[in-house]
Structure formats: structure tokens, C-alpha cells
Amino acid sequence: MPAFRATALSALGLAAFLVFWEAMPRLGLINPAFLPPPSTIPTAFLREIQLGVWGEAVWSSLSHYVVGLTVGAGAGIALGLLSGMFSGFEAVTAWIVRLLRPIPGLAWVPFAIIWFGVQPSAAVFIIAIGVFWIVFFATQGAVRGVDRDLVEVAQAFGFRSPWSRLVKILLPAATPGILVGLRTALGQAWMAVVAAEIFGVPGVGARMMQASSLLSTDIVVVYMLTMAGLYGLFDTGFVALQGWLLRWRA
């Protein structure tokens, strides 16, 4: 299918969806207080900007997002590399992983409040937990998936220390798999932002909960679309970075 035709069909589908959404509350099929028509969203967005609320909420959430993503992904990569490289480390941590992995991020909220209080550090903790396991398993699997023949060749050429094997063979070969995990983590971190902020930490999640309690669903939609737009920017930037890092494969 030509690119122009595909783009036109996508635009048509989006327009049809917006028309359907607009018609449902306008025709009285849905209470506008429960689902506002999309035509009301720009006005709500401008009002939030004029009040200075939007910029403050987005900046707070971005800071939680970036720090939580960095901490969780960094820990996931580090421990994933250790687990992938050393079978002894994997064996020691196997039951710990099986015990902690099924626990959802929301289950850590009470401990986050107890340990950190209603502070940004609590939100960072929840986001980091949500990101960690995705990156950990992606890194571990990518390292385990490296061709053992490459490792044997590296040892034959004198790269026998764990550090030299990591830098020269394992990390370059595992990078594509690690990057896949990181890209998935970008989206998971945004989902964790709302969960991390609903208990009172200032940010997009807290603003959405405040608006929903007042049945200001147009404001809720504003922040939902804000998060979607920001994720799209981050994902586009990451794809460009991924292409640059893997340019040697072209």
C-alpha cells in the first residue's frame, strides 16, 4: 500500500473516531459529565495553561519519570548483565526473582509512603520498580542469547576476563535486545507515573485524580492526551537513538 494512501486512511479513521466520540454526548447517548466531547478539550487545555497548572504538573511528572526510569533501567541492566554472565549469580537470585516478580507495582505503594512519605522520592521508587523487571529480563535474555561461539573466539584471542568479555563481545551483541526492553520500559514508566502520583505526590496523576473527584472529565482527558503526546515524543526520540546506536548493523 502506498505511503500516501496509508496516511490518508489513518487520518480518515481518526476523523471517524472523533466524529463518533463527539456525537455520543451531543446526542445524549452518554452523559457529557462522564465523557466530554472532544470539542471541549482545547478550551480545557488552554484554561489549564493559563492557570499555570498544566506546566507545573507536567514538569513534576517528567522529573519523576526521568529519574525513576533512569534508576529502574540502570539497576535492571546492571543486575541483568550479572545474571546473564554468571550462572552462579542467577542461581543465587532465582528464588528471590520468582518471589518478587509477580508483585505488582501498586502493591509497593504502602511501603513507598512508609519509607519515603508523600514525597517525589516515593513516586520515583514506584516508577523504578515498574521499569526494573522489564529491563532486567530483557538484559538477561539478551546476554544469554549471545552466540557462545563468539565468547569462545574472544577467549581464544585473549579476552578472558569478565570485563573484557562484557565490553568486547557480550554488550555489543546484546545491545539490540537491551534496547527493546528499554523501549518497552518507556511506556511502562508512563503508566507507573499515574499510579505513583495518585496518593498525593504532585504531578499529572494527582491532577487527574483531583479533576475526576470534581467530575471535570475534560481536564482528565487533557492530561491523558498530554501523557500520550509526551510518550510519543520520547518514543520517537528513542527510536532515532536506537537507529544511531545500531547503525553498524546496516
Image (cartoon, rainbow, N blue to C red):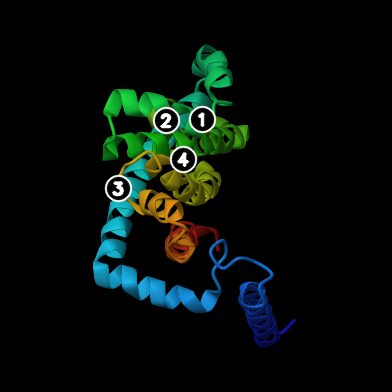
- State the separation of the CA atoms marked 1 and 3: 56 Å
Check disc 3 and give the amino acid type: Pro
Element type at mark 2 = helix
Q: Is residue 152 above or below residue 191?
A: above
| Relative image position of residue 137 (x, y in whole percent) | 55, 34
Check disc 1 and give the amino acid type: Ala
Element type at mark 1 = helix
- State the separation of the CA atoms marked 3 and 4: 38 Å
Check disc 4 and give the amino acid type: Leu
Could you tell me if the residues under marks 1 and 3 are in contact, i.e. CB atoms within 8 Å? Answer: no
Closer-to-camera residue (82/227): 227
Q: Is residue 57 visible?
A: yes
Q: Say which of marks 1 and 3 sits in front.
A: 3
Residue receiving disc 1: 156
From the viewer's perspective, tell me whether residue 95 is left or right of residue 73.
right
Q: Is residue 206 above or below residue 107?
A: below
- State the separation of the CA atoms marked 2 and 1: 50 Å
Sooner in the amino-acid sequence: mark 1 or mark 3: 1
Q: Which mark is residue 171?
A: 4
